[in-house]
Image (cartoon, rainbow, N blue to C red):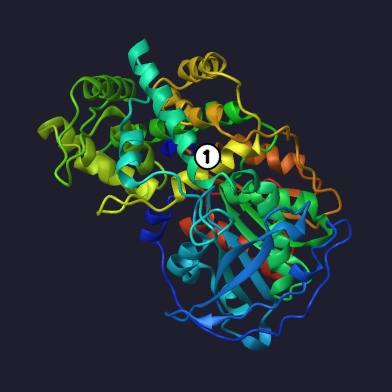
Amino acid sequence: MRATTTIGVVMALTLAVTACNGSAQEKPATPQTPPAGSPAGTDSFYKQRLSWSDCGGGFQCAKANVPIDYTKPSTGQMRISLIRLPAQNKSERIGSLFTNPGGPGGSGVDFIRQAGRSFGKDLRDRFDIIGFDPRGVGSSDPVRCMDGRRLDQYFSTDSSPDDQRELDTLAAQSKGFAEACKGRASAHLPYVGTLNAARDMDVLRAAVGDEKLTYYGASYGTYLGAFYAEQFPKKVRALVLDGAVDPKESSTQTLVEQAKGFETALRAFVADCVKRADCPLGRSEDAAIDKISAFLKQVDKTPLRNRQDARKVTESWTTMGMATALYLKEYWAVLRQAFTQAFQQQDGTLFITLADQMIERKPDGTYSNQSEANMAVNCVDKPNPPNLATYEKSVDQAEKSSPLFGAFVVWGGLPCVYWPVQTKQQPKPITAKGSAPILVIGTIRDPATPYKWSQSLASQLDSGVLLSLDGDGHTAYLQANPCISRATDNYLVTTKPPKDGTVCR
């Protein structure tokens, strides 16, 4: 993947502006049976009880077993890692609040360890806040394909090829990514998709003793939550889908629309920048966009220097860093500084530092498995174009509407063309007929999950309710907007959503 093919939360950025605290107990889990229509042979998974143990900082951790293949539950198991922050008020405890931070590929365990205390007090009092690493992610039988050196090569590759030689190189790197995953992770690749991850979530719900699911999902987590609701509508208690992904769009159209989202977010950044004394882009919005475009073309020819390691700050790293800063409005000041250093000193260190946060590259040159899991899930969730020529048409479409981000975003999905596992599961609207009300939250200038996706998902769901934030950045709840926080917390506690179409500012 490329950074912006991740439909997820850059939690390292979000967590920089959140905090809180607490601790408590749980009700004993009641063994449960699979819902009607569940595959035969899953009873033992539904009846398992989790063994929670202290894992530091007031958190408790556990492992759960799920079938590798739900159509043949007896053929093998995967282990799912969980973490929880126990409810603070035992007498008012409602149950568990499951969460997913996005990605696909984001670690739910890391998310709760870092951000669990950022949830509202009413939620912290009444729910065990639970995170889990979905299958193939983090510490749940992770998909691993390449070492840090090879991932550095992949991410350094020119993501907006200007000639046949550069296109051939990009295609070779993308094919190499797919082949590396086939070589090291082929046994799990057919089973890591969202359909199975949603089934896992129902097993986890049962394993903690909850009759119905209460859930907060951000970004890709909305896709996971929607898949859950579609399969288990009668098991929905309250679902918050924050920064929605549109399930009915094709794999390439998703990327084309996401590129538009980044373009919209960049223009919002520019509109803010040109009003500030420290803006290095000038005083005109159109001129500022032209300056950024010219800058990226120059970096394509002459990479910027990097003070943190031996990597050259290429156009790809620069664009990725620029995209990362758009995930959170509080990081616009960092982006202004990055442009200033690049213009005045030809120094791209801030850009590559931001990019490293996006792809979870560590200072020692190693990576989490976020990038590999992201690609593995995305590539099996929807059908992919059959060849490079077909794929290239989507790039052309994206560049017309998103000249600065189109190529970068869409070419990022190219490994899926060569992926060893392909699906026949076609994209379609999700209705979750018979579900309790589901709250969909959309941020109007969200870069990674365009607002139109939240509008679309809310309208697809039979019981969808749309709550909007007239603001910037990726997702809304952890931005600490009081209007969003009150409406979301009240819904999760009472199951009563706000009025459909409510807009917070």
Which quadrant of the figure has residue 317?
top left
Residue furthest to the left: 345
Secondary structure type for disc 1: helix
Q: Nearer the viewer, residue 328 or 392?
A: 392
Q: Which of 53 and 408 is in front in this view?
A: 53
Which quadrant of the figure has residue 198?
bottom right
Q: Position of residue 236 (x, y in %)?
A: 77, 60
Residue 136, placed above or below residue 2:
below
Describe residue 203's horizontal placement relative to residue 182 as left or right.
right
Q: Position of residue 215 (x, y in %)?
A: 65, 62
Residue 237, placed above or below residue 279:
below
Describe residue 333's horizontal placement relative to residue 323 as left or right.
left
Q: Residue at x 69, y 85 (%)?
A: 27
Q: Residue at x 25, y 30 (%)?
A: 314
Q: Which of 78 and 230 is in front in this view?
A: 78
Q: Residue at x 25, y 27 (%)?
A: 283
The amino acid type of the residue labelled 1 equals Lys
The residue indicated by pointer 1 is 182
Q: Residue at x 61, y 59 (%)?
A: 216
Q: Position of residue 12 (x, y in %)?
A: 38, 55
